[in-house]
Amino acid sequence: MSITWITRVETPSDIEPLRALTREAFGRQFEVDFLDALRADPVAWIPGLSFVATTSDDEPIAYAILSRCHVDDVPVLSLSPVAVMPAYQRQGAGGAAVRAALAAVRDRVEPAVVVLGHADYYPRFGFRQATEFGIHHPQHDGPHLMALALGNHAVPAGNLTFPVTG
């Protein structure tokens, strides 16, 4: 049976449920603190680019957030974090949130989206290893750092920095 998830932009009333979701999905306070720091950062946080997948009664069960980071001095988007309530994992809710987020930014001025995640999961959305584009990060070079070109943009090469974590 295939489930069709409801996806929408995050609202202010989602913040507390998303904190709880993050705590449950990751099992650590670090990710909740990261999410709060991301929302508080005026460079990284882009209102309207946090997407929630919900149940039919509007309970947030997954989310995907796009924030701003840089490849050298070129602004790009970062798909991070993405989380799914454990009871709903492997049912497509996370993928629905990721697809909604990526669909919303196809025509933006940023040339690319980067993600630090599972190398066997993100290629289904079109991501390739970031090193293929010449994108590097001193702590995260390897198969888990991936990039996706947006539209007809050329993906910039250089060193990746995240405003919240460096």
Image (cartoon, rainbow, N blue to C red):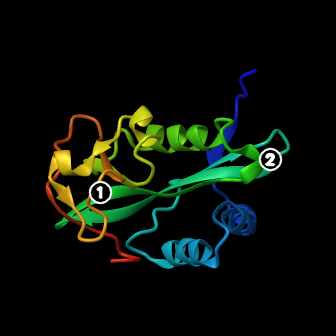
Residue drawn at point x = 64 percent, y = 45 percent: 8
Q: Which labelled disc corresponds to residue 34? A: none
Query: Where is 143 relative to 74, above or below?
Result: above
- Label 2 element class: loop
Q: Which labelled disc corresponds to residue 76? A: 1
- Label 1 element class: strand
Task: Using a 10 Å C-alpha cutoff, classify the residue at mark 1 as few (fewer than 14 neighbours), some (14 to 19) or many (20 or more).
Answer: many
Left or right: residue 9 versus residue 81 is right
Say which residue label 2 marks.
58
Quarter of the N terminus within the rendering: top right
Which sits in the foreground, 116 or 103? 116
Which of the two discs, 2 and 1, labels the residue nearer the N terminus? 2
Task: Using a 10 Å C-alpha cutoff, classify the residue at mark 2 as few (fewer than 14 neighbours), some (14 to 19) or many (20 or more).
Answer: few
Q: Position of residue 47 (x, y in %)?
A: 51, 61
Residue 109 visible in the current orientation? no
**Marks 2 and 1, how far apart at CA:** 31 Å
Left or right: residue 51 versus residue 122 is right
Residue drawn at point x = 51 percent, y = 78 percent: 37
Residue drawn at point x = 26 percent, y = 65 percent: 70
- Badge 2 amino acid: Asp
Left or right: residue 126 versus residue 60 is left
Quarter holding residue 77 = bottom left
- Badge 1 amino acid: Val
Quarter of the C terminus within the rendering: bottom left
Residue 78 visible in the current orientation? yes
Quarter holding residue 28 = bottom right
- Farthest residue, direction top: 1
Query: Where is 14 relative to 91, above or below?
Result: below
Q: Position of residue 122 (x, y in %)?
A: 43, 42
* Picture mark count: 2
